[in-house]
Amino acid sequence: MSLSSNTHTLVDRFGRTVDYLRISITDRCDFRCIYCMSEEMTFLPRAQILTLEELAFIAKAFTELGVKKIRITGGEPLVRRGALSLLQEIGGMESLRELVITTNGSRLEEMAVSLKAAGVKRVNISLDTLDKEKFKEITRTGDLNKVLRGIEAAKKAGFERIKLNAVILKNRNHQEVGDLVQYAVDNKIDISFIEEMPLGVVDHERAEDYYSSASIKSDLADKFELIAISDNTGGPSVYYQVVGTSTRVGFISPHSANFCSTCNRVRLTVEGQLLLCLGNEHSVDLKRVIRANPGNLDKLKESIIQAMQIKPEKHEFNLQEQPIILRHMNATGG
């Protein structure tokens, strides 16, 4: 059977159509954010990760199977040598509607114009605080001013949308949610607040640091009027409009408002594991498939289609327990 046409769609056993792929192109990062990885990390050796050509080959298979949106992630994707050429190749794929990227912003000042030229339509930038000292504490190695200059460069480059992502931790940065929204409003960009994902063992108590989306909304109500809107960017954010502005505020709530029933996405790790769920270990080794069957696009597509049958219904996160998922967020794809 030939699977060369692009008429196929990916549907799991719960009737959910998968049309969104997140691709991690590196587990490395120039930051060491406390919720993402340990301070001392061991990264994958080059031989274990997918080549740029293999990443593009897998992306091609997914687009021919109906995936319309691809997000490039890491680690920090822009630290990988050759990232721009990969983005150009994926961005030019027929039937792909949207190529987007998540970045920590450290390299946007130099690369924003090139990213736009490569076909990237939207950029998500991690920004958890506007306080220089807190930024250093949370990222361990980051320079806030460099990231802020990167945001300015992204604005000038003319992407369709720019969104900030802020992971909110109680007594670390929860007091800043109003300032972060005001920064987004002033810069005419969007922002999403994220409840911490319990992936990997980290050096803080997640249960003690947990700050819910409901608490953030309550805090924001003192300063902003938010109205619920139906906007959907294909991800898990539930959006509100800041009245009188162009800014949307999103909430990603893996604990307080499980979004699994409408899950339309899968993740490819830089090792080649197709993760069917962020909070479970259900996966298929696509690296093994493509290296055992060089250039065989149909064989790869068959493996992807079959993988949909093991996509779980939902994840089960419990902040009171040690994480059942031992891989860190940088290894999962941010």
Image: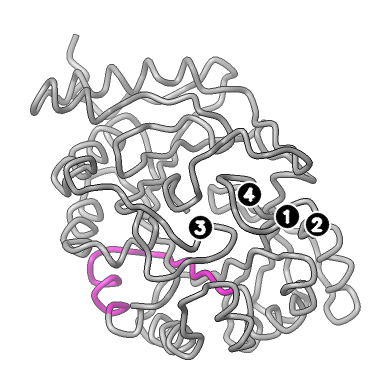
Q: Residue sitting at 28 percent across and 67 percent down?
A: 79
Q: Are marks 2 and 1 in contact (CB under 8 Å)?
A: yes
Q: Does dot 3 land on a helix, a strand or a loop? A: loop
Asked whether 60 or 164 is in front, the reply is 164
Colour scheme employed for the rendering of this structure = one colour
- Mark 4 to mark 1: distance in Å? 12 Å
Residue 180: image location, x then y, percent:
68, 80
- Residue pointed to by mark 3: 38
Residue 208: image location, x then y, percent:
80, 57
- Residue pointed to by mark 4: 197
Asked whether 284 or 5 is in front, the reply is 284
User: Magenta residues?
Assistant: 111-127
Q: How dense is the environment of label 2, judged by Cα within 10 Å: few (below 14), some, or many (20 and up)?
A: few
Q: How dense is the environment of label 3, judged by Cα within 10 Å: few (below 14), some, or many (20 and up)?
A: some
Q: Earlier in the sequence, mark 3 or mark 2?
A: 3
Q: Is residue 102 left or right of residue 178?
A: left
- Residue 94: in magenta span: no
Q: Residue sitting at 44 percent across and 33 percent down?
A: 275
Q: Is residue 301 above or below residue 36?
A: above
- Mark 4 to mark 3: distance in Å? 14 Å
Q: Residue sitting at 72 percent across and 50 percent down?
A: 253
- Residue 120: in magenta span: yes
- Residue pointed to by mark 1: 205
